[in-house]
Amino acid sequence: MKRYALPGLIVAVIAGLFALPVAGQKLVTPGYLFNSDPTCREMNGEFYLFTTQDPFTVNFEIPNAFYKGMYAYHALTTTDFDNWVDHGSILTGRDVSWNGGDALWDGDAGIPGASGYYAYAPFRINSASENNYGTYDIGAFTAVNPFGPYKDVYNAPMKMADGKPLEGLSPSVVRDENGSAYLIWGSGDTAKHEVMLARLKPDMTQLAEAPRRLEVPATDSCGNLEYFESPVLFHSGNIWYLTWVAYKDDKGPHCDANGSYVNYAMSSSVFGPFNGPVHHLVYPAGNGEESVQQGICSYRGHTYLAYHVPYENVVGENDHHRQVAVTELAVLSDGTLAPVYPSRDKGAGTPGVTHLILDAFAPRREAAEFHLRVNAEGEPGLHGEYQMKMGDGGYLQFHQVDFGSGASRFRVEVSSENKSLSNGKLEVHLDNPSGPLIAAIDIIPTGGRTSYRILTGPVADNAKGVHDLCLVARGQSTTMQRRLFNITWFAFDRR
């Protein structure tokens, strides 16, 4: 896997210079955030999209070997599929004490329940130093609103009836015709290919029964592996649909072409069997070695499919970086689903129109998700995240940040291993690095590059509406210490 250096002084990206994954593809975050493994639902009259985060943006693309660089869930919302709000990181690898291998893979969040909102997330439990796809356990998390921050319920994985950790990937919640909630998931060992389903207790954080294994096809008529991963279960009318990801190898003239497909089978029961016939739902997109993956939900009486496709960077190299698209899903008269061809899919909403703003009040905005940087370098922090090492006068710029009717306080996590730092300060400006100053935080050495401190300060009254945002570093140091301090994330509190 090729690793390449990024310039330390300035990176400015014009989206049109980068190749989109597929010609004509309408993406949720084009030319900006990488995102993958989407799930979705309707709440409060809005379409909610939850995704994992590949590292990190087209402005700062970090290798993602074995998908070990995935570190956070994002939440995004829209009402028209043209205008999106990114609500930042709602759950990260830093939030989980039993996260042994950094990687956070496909789960679900924003699930309403009696005591707030729930998320189910698989974390890698074997060491990140191992060059493999790993094994994963599933944790349960709660929050007071869909955007988090989510808290680990048990500070440990969920448990099976025998007390063993719940090993699995792709957990999500499905409700049967009577409203009972079930957790569905796939094998947490990527060498296995099983689909499990178990009813949840009313607290939504414990299994109420022993899991049952759903019947799914193992291979197709050409000998290809059929069910591989990502079980997503939904119903329309009287039909239950189990969708999954299948990888195909070209084995002859009557076999499927190489690539990753989203396939499905139908049943009259939530418990299946889902053993066929098998239909294609999403055809391969771009690089056939990269997966597509699906989330399906209803919104305003229509059914929608969210799926990710591979991102090909400017030099044509793919390193497990993906971006999400959303399209309407048609149920045909015979109950089958109209197939989706990513290369032809214009997406939901207005073709070619996507406008993204950043919620200033996200629980955590990653410093590595900048649009532009000057005199700033990135380096690994803890559990897959990156921190930005800031030089004097260096800044990070974030486009289209929405402050609404105003912010009261600014919060930022920083560290500094620079013992010679003096007069350290982080300035927060609107519009450009010399624009209106809305906050300033004094920074002193913290004793190490990952010895973090969360610092706060008041925000001026003029931080209202939508602005570009610049975090500007100030301070002095010996000439041997070019970088003053490091920033991992920041956030604002509402006025």
Image (tube, rainbow, N blue to C red):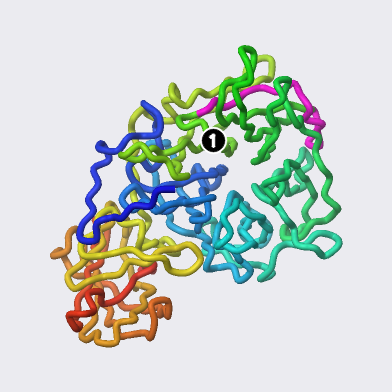
Along the viewing direction, whichever of 193 and 266 lies nearer the viewer: 193
- Residue on which disc 1 sits: 292
Residue 274, magenta (yes or no): yes
Tell whether 279 sits left or right of 18: right
Along the viewing direction, whichever of 160 and 66 lies nearer the viewer: 66
The magenta segment is 268-284
Along the viewing direction, whichever of 27 and 146 lies nearer the viewer: 27
Q: Is residue 353 visible?
A: yes
Counting labels gives 1
Residue furthest top in the image: 253
Q: Kindly state the secondary structure of the residue where label 1 is placed.
A: loop
- Asked if 277 appears above or below 183 in the picture, the reply is above
Residue 114, magenta (yes or no): no
The structure residue drawn at horizontal position 43% and vertical position 57%, both measured from the top left corner, is 88
Tell whether 201 sits left or right of 370: right
The structure residue drawn at horizontal position 28% and vertical position 78%, both measured from the top left corner, is 441
